Image (spheres, grey):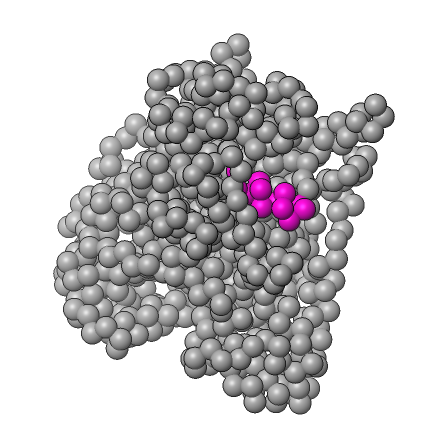
């Protein structure tokens, strides 16, 4: 890749729409748009790691000028641009049906992270990808959302494994000038800066915009000259460990984010808050209403009636609790603006089960919202049990916490080769109807050989990608050869391949399969029916226990007695996740129940014909039907690791391995392919983000907007 030298203004007029397209992540979930950029120059597209802005800025201008003469490219360009512009038209008729339109009918979505594409690395895991998929599906459906989050200029972390298997945490700075993101400018053409209201000493943020189809996402950054040095790092990384710095980050997200929307004129009637990090947005919305003359109680009730709070945390320790002295330090000048004194303000965040612990962000989020949900049916029940004390007058079963099971954005997570198969056998318009279960019955029309050949191609592509990553590190860094050998260079696409890829936290039990090493060796090294396992995932920088799990996996991967059939692939990100969920044969998931609130990686695998081998927890309790994969363990988590590991071994030995290698004369395992088809049919519609967003609209968004509309109507008639 050459040094960045062009400006997008130099793109020839005939194809000038490439600039607008490159800066809208719509291209990331439309394969025809990605193919358009790939047609310009295949090598540049690959070297940019599929980032069209970076590619266009670095490519030789002669290539762009030549594309104007390429009729095949121009036909593709015209088709893609026409589709893009058609999708950008606002159409929210279905969404506001039966709601009397008033001044504003939009929603503001707040989240600490967003997983949109690997060119924008401001995500850590599932919470971020859920937020990213929510925005993409909102764009597809025409749900009027504006979103707020953080830039995180130093990203999450770039993972490197050293020779003893320890995770090294390197910064992964966002290349802002070559990313699909734009500065928000003021009237003088300078980067726009706002002051976070009522916070002393003063805090300032500049902000950027990411265009996600029809949805605008505003990202804040405190690393600017206007801030004191100790304030500049507030938004540098996700999930800062220091309690005080974490509080400052959450103040900027909730209160600063609300101010960004206010300054940008982005009026909204409803708040949707993604986890407890965001809940100070409720305070700011209340303060705005109090400033117009409302009492606190009236402002609180109006805000509460138009706020949705989604909790993702199935354990009490996962909720942020701020010490009271820190809350006093930062909010003593704020609570008078709400019309409250110290005690009444701090009481907003008290958890009745532990009133002396501090200001509980989740407790406040639940108190300050009318609509609450867990992210799977199982998690909804757990949340009702955890937070029943907030509604002591209700039974635990009737505690007002609903559940909307997470879903994945199908156009993003479907592999293009698989999508071509679906286009052929499900009809070219299946994408627009993909939440209809009837459509997926046609999966059975796909010839077994075609589905298997496509999967085998993706599996080979995964192995080659892993090898290429290892080769690049070998060339660039000359690391210990054991690092390279343990990273997957000895993998074989003909072997049954299990994938385990997720954040390395202790409850996810990455090393569960190593409970009986000798039994595992016999499974792995069977001469005629071998098995290989690919591990990937990052530990939080402050999580030494998670890093020790990675180290354990690495040490087993470099053990020669496993023959290179255990691999740890470093620096797991959205790009590698795509390869893995498309290319392995089985997706392994074995967290300690009931700590998996939902889990969406298994949905992504299943959508692409990769069956799950998963414990009964999260979404799999709803997803497993006895024909689309395997389930094991106890839903309540009352069994030992040894017992759960024994279940895995037995399933592999008795069912999984024999089924995979049960081939006919043509080399096809007809029964395995039937399993793959069932995995797709049982996942695609019920676990899609489209189903999820239609549920949010029906259960929460429309009632909240109707309330807001009614309030506006009353104001106009009085």
The answer to whether residue 672 is visible is no
The answer to whether residue 227 is visible is yes
| Residue depicted at x 53% and y 71% | 53
Residue 219: x %, y % from top left: 52, 52
Residue 668: x %, y % from top left: 43, 65
The quadrant of the image that shows the C terminus is top right
Residue 627: x %, y % from top left: 47, 45
Q: Is residue 257 magenta?
A: yes
Q: Is residue 429 magenta?
A: no
Q: Which residues are magenta?
A: 255-266
Task: Give the side of residue 649 with respect to residue 610, left or right.
Answer: left
Establish if 181 lies above or below 348: below
The quadrant of the image that shows the N terminus is bottom left
Total marks placed: 0
| Residue depicted at x 22% and y 37% | 642
| Residue depicted at x 28% and y 30% | 639
Viewer-nearest residue: 629 or 551:
551
């Amino acid at each position: 890749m050459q040094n960045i030298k062009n400006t997008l203004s130099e793109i020839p007029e005939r194809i000038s729409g490439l600039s607008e397209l490159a800066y809208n992540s719509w291209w990331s979930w439309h394969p025809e748009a990605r193919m358009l950029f790939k047609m310009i120059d295949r090598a540049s597209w690959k070297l940019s790691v599929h980032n069209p802005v970076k590619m266009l800025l670095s490519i030789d201008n002669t290539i762009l000028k030549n594309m104007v003469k390429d009729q095949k490219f121009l036909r593709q360009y015209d088709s893609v641009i026409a589709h893009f512009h058609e999708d950008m038209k606002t159409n929210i008729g279905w969404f506001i049906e039966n709601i009397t339109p008033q001044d504003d009918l939009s929603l503001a979505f707040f989240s600490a992270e967003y997983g949109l594409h690997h060119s924008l690395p401001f995500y850590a895991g599932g919470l971020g990808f859920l937020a990213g998929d929510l925005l993409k599906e909102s764009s597809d459906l025409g749900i009027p959302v504006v979103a707020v989050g953080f830039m995180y200029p130093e990203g999450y972390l770039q993972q490197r494994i050293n020779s003893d298997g320890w995770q090294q945490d390197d910064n992964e700075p966002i290349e802002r000038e070559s990313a699909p993101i734009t500065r928000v400018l003021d009237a003088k053409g300078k980067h726009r800066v706002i002051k976070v209201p009522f916070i002393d000493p003063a805090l300032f943020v500049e902000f950027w915009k990411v265009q996600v189809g029809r949805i605008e996402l505003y990202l804040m950054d405190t690393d600017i000259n206007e801030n004191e040095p100790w304030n500049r790092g507030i938004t540098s990384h996700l999930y800062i460990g220091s309690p005080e710095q974490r509080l400052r980050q959450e103040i900027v997200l909730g209160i600063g984010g609300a101010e960004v929307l206010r300054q940008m004129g982005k009026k909204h009637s409803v708040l949707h808050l993604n986890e407890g990090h965001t809940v100070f947005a409720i305070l700011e919305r209340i303060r705005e209403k109090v400033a117009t003359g409302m009492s606190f109680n009236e402002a609180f009730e109006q805000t509460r009636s138009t706020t949705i709070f989604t909790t993702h945390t199935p354990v009490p320790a996962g909720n942020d609790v701020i010490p009271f002295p820190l809350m006093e330090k930062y909010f003593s000048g704020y609570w008078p603006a709400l019309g409250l004194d110290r005690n009444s303000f701090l009481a907003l965040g008290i958890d009745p089960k532990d009133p002396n612990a501090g200001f509980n962000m989740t407790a406040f989020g639940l108190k300050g919202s009318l609509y609450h949900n867990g992210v799977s049916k199982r998690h909804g029940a757990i949340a009702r049990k955890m937070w029943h004390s907030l509604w002591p007058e209700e039974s635990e079963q009737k505690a007002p916490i609903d559940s909307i099971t997470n879903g994945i954005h199908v156009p993003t997570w479907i592999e293009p080769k698989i999508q071509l198969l679906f286009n052929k056998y499900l009809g070219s318009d299946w994408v627009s109807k993909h939440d209809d279960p009837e459509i997926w019955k046609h999966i059975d029309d796909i010839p077994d050989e075609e589905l298997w050949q496509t999967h085998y191609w993706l599996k080979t592509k995964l192995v080659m990608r892993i090898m290429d990553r290892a080769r690049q590190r070998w060339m660039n860094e000359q690391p210990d050869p054991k690092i390279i050998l343990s990273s997957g260079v000895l993998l074989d696409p003909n072997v049954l391949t299990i994938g385990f890829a997720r954040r390395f936290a202790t409850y996810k039990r990455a090393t569960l399969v190593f409970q009986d090493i000798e039994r595992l060796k016999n499974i792995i090294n069977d001469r005629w029916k071998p098995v290989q396992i690919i591990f990937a995932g990052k530990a939080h920088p402050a999580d030494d226990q998670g890093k020790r799990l990675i180290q354990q996996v690495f040490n087993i991967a470099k053990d020669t007695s496993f023959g290179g059939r255990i691999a740890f692939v470093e620096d797991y990100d959205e790009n590698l996740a795509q390869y893995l969920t498309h290319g392995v044969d089985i997706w392994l998931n074995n967290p300690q129940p009931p700590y998996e609130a939902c889990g969406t990686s298994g949905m992504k695998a299943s959508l692409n014909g990769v069956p799950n081998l998963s414990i009964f927890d999260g979404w799999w309790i709803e997803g497993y039907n006895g024909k689309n994969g395997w389930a094991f363990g106890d839903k309540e988590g009352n069994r030992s690791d040894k017992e759960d590991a024994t279940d895995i071994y037995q399933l592999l030995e008795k069912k999984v391995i024999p089924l995979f290698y049960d081939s006919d004369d043509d080399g096809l395992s007809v029964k395995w392919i039937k399993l793959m088809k069932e995995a797709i049919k049982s996942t695609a519609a019920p676990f899609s983000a489209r189903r999820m967003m239609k549920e949010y609209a029906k259960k929460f968004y429309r009632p909240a907007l109707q309330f807001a509309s009614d309030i506006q109507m009353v104001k106009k008639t009085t």
